[in-house]
Image: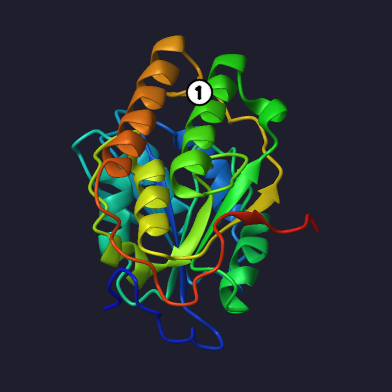
Amino acid sequence: MTVPGTLPDALPRRPRVVAIVPALDEQAAVARLLPEFPRDVVAEVIVVDNGSRDATAAVARQGGARVVSEPRRGYGRACRAGLRAARGADVVVYLDGDYSDDPAQIPRLLAPLLRGEADLVVGTRDQGAALPAHQRAGNALAMGLLRLLFGVRLADPGSFRAARREVLLALGLAHPTYGWPVEMLVKAARSGYRILGVPVPSRPRWGGRSKVGGTLRGSILAGWHMIAIILKYAAGRPLGRRPGSRPQGRAAPAA
């Protein structure tokens, strides 16, 4: 297994890519999302049912996904359960289960990994496209702190991500809820892994209201967790940089 600060071996020419979709009460969105995955690129889709009260799990199975149950609520718990379940994957891709992330963009996120230019690729959204003002403000604050304290230059802490599975396992990600995405960025930066932003289109969620941006309370909670994680690790001793690592977070040009 890769340990923080070490260089992973080159990816296979045709890596096994597994998509992980955390989902809570998203049966309509999941039904619409699953047929859109490029199956010539993605070997398997794992839907992590995070204690849904609707038919999310049944719809996911009908759509050809493997369903992993994580009944303990929490976005980070669901992401971690999917990562553990993706055994045999060279690369994992995270997408939200609300339809806002477009699976057609997966090859764009994979390209820097395959070229050996990045260890973690983040799909950065157009902040004005589908996010409410209070969520944009919280994201801007978190991204400013990441840039100032860790040198991570990303326009957005997007949840649409591609990374080598062994790298994520080595980081020991543990935050149970909204802090998971920022914990990933902070630990990857402190370990010297290369983080790259790739602009991707964002589309409206399918049905219902966002659990984060849909309410002021959800946005405040998410923002509090993100900022707390950034400050917690900023106060700690760096884990060490990988020799020859590149600056963090340079955005790839849009296609």
The residue depicted at 50 percent of the width and 48 percent of the height is: 95
Q: Residue at x 39, y 40 (%)?
A: 23
Q: Is residue 214 left or right of residue 41?
A: left
**Residue 169 spot, x, y in % from top left:** 28, 65
Residue drawn at x 38%, y 30% is 227
Residue 66 percent across, percent down from the top left = 36, 59
Dot 1: element? helix
The percent coordinates of residue 55 (x first, y second) are: 36, 35
Name the residue nearer the viewer: 141 or 114: 141
Q: Nearer the viewer, residue 52 or 130?
A: 130
Q: Nearer the viewer, residue 190 or 74?
A: 190
Q: Residue 137: name its quadrant.
A: top right
Q: Quadrant of the C terminus?
A: bottom right
The residue identified by callout 1 is 138
- The type of residue carrying mark 1 is Gly
* Image position, residue 127 (x, y; %): 67, 31
Q: Is residue 4 above or below residue 48?
A: below
Give the answer, above or below, for where 211 lies relative to 19: above
Query: Considering only vertical position in the picture, is 113 above or below 106?
Result: below
- Which of the image's four quarters has the N terminus? bottom left
Disc tally is 1
Residue occupying the far left of the picture: 72
Image-based side of 114 in relation to 240, left or right:
right
The residue located at (55%, 15%) in the rendering is 134
